[in-house]
Image (cartoon, rainbow, N blue to C red):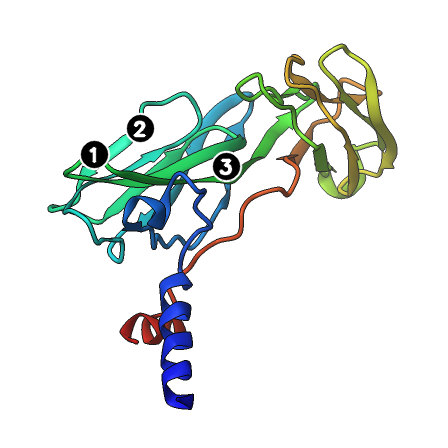
Amino acid sequence: MRNGMVLALLMLTASLAGCTGASEDGGEAEGVDLKVYYDETVGVVEQTWRNGQQTGSQSVTLNFDFARVTSTDDPLVAFFVLPGDGREEIVTDANQTASIDVEYATHGLYALTYGARTEGGAEASEEITIRIDLRIDWQDTGTTNPDDANIRVMTDGTQGVDRVAVSSTVNNIGNLGGVLGRAVSATWELLDGSDGLRATGTAQIADGQEETWEGSSGPAEADEGDWVLRITLDTDDEQVTVTSVIDVLHVESESPAQPFTSDQSEVDKI
C-alpha cells in the first residue's frame, strides 16, 4: 500500500513538473500537457552611437522549446508564440520543429503568449511577461560642443519606463602636457520629454583629466517624448571626448524563466 501511494505521488509530480501554470482554459484542460522551456524572460537591446550617428544595434532573441509538449486526445499540429508587441503570431508545424525564436528590437514590457494546437482544434496557451531594457553606448570624440543624446523612453504606448540611468565621462583632451591647455567646466543635464530637468551635475576638469557623472530619474510616462542627455562646456576652444552609458529600465516584473534542467529530465522519465 505504501509503495502504491509513493507511485501515485510520483506520477502526480511528473504531470505537474515543467508546466507553466496554464489557465483553466488551457494546458491539460484541453488534453495538452504544455511543457514549454525557456532560459530567459529578460534581455537588453543595445545601441551604439558615435559622433551623433547610430553605428550598431543588437537585438534580443529568446528561444522557446516545445519538444516535450504532449497531447493525450489527438495529435499536435502546431506550436505558436504571440510576441505581444503587435506582430502576428509565430507558428511552426509541430511535425517539423519544436523550437521557436522570438526577436525583440525595441525595449518594453511584453505580454507574450505561447501555446500548442491539436488536429482536432484543441488549444493550450500560457501568457508570460517579457522585459526588454535598452542600453545606449554613446561616444562623441574630439568635440568642443557635445551632441545631445536622445533617449527614446516611449515603447508601444501602453507603459512607460521605470527609470533612466546615466553614467557619463568627459575627458579633457590633453594639450602638450597641459602647457597649452586649460581646465574645462562641464555640466550634465538629464531632461525629460517636456524639457523638465530631472538630474544635473557639474565638474571642473583639468587639462588631460576626466570626470564621471552618474544620475538617474524616473518614471517616464508612456506618451512622453524623447528624453535628452545634454552636456555643455564653459568654453568652445577645448576639445573633449564624451563617453556615456545610458540605461532605459523597466519595472522588474518579468515572469520567471523555465529552463530545462537535468533534474527535470529525470522527472520526465518517471
Is residue 74 in sight in this rendering?
A: yes
Residue at x-position 50% and y-position 37%: 46
Residue at x-position 42% and y-position 55%: 39
The relative height of residue 7 versus residue 99 in the rendered view (above or below) is below
Mark 3–mark 1 distance (CA, rounded to whole Å): 40 Å
Pointers 3 and 1 in contact (C-beta within 8 Å)? no
Q: Which residue is mark 3?
A: 46
Q: Which residue is mark 1?
A: 121
The relative height of residue 154 versus residue 36 in the rendered view (above or below) is above
Task: Tell me which numbered mark, 3 or 1, is placed earlier along the sequence.
Answer: 3
**Which-is-in-front pick, marks 2 and 1?**
1
State the quadrant of the C terminus: bottom left
Which percent across, then down, holds residue 213? 79, 38
Is label 1 in a helix, a strand or a loop?
A: loop
Pointers 2 and 1 in contact (C-beta within 8 Å)? no
What residue type is disc 1 on?
Gly
Which one is in front, 241 or 38?
Answer: 38
Classify residue 238 as left or right of residue 155: right
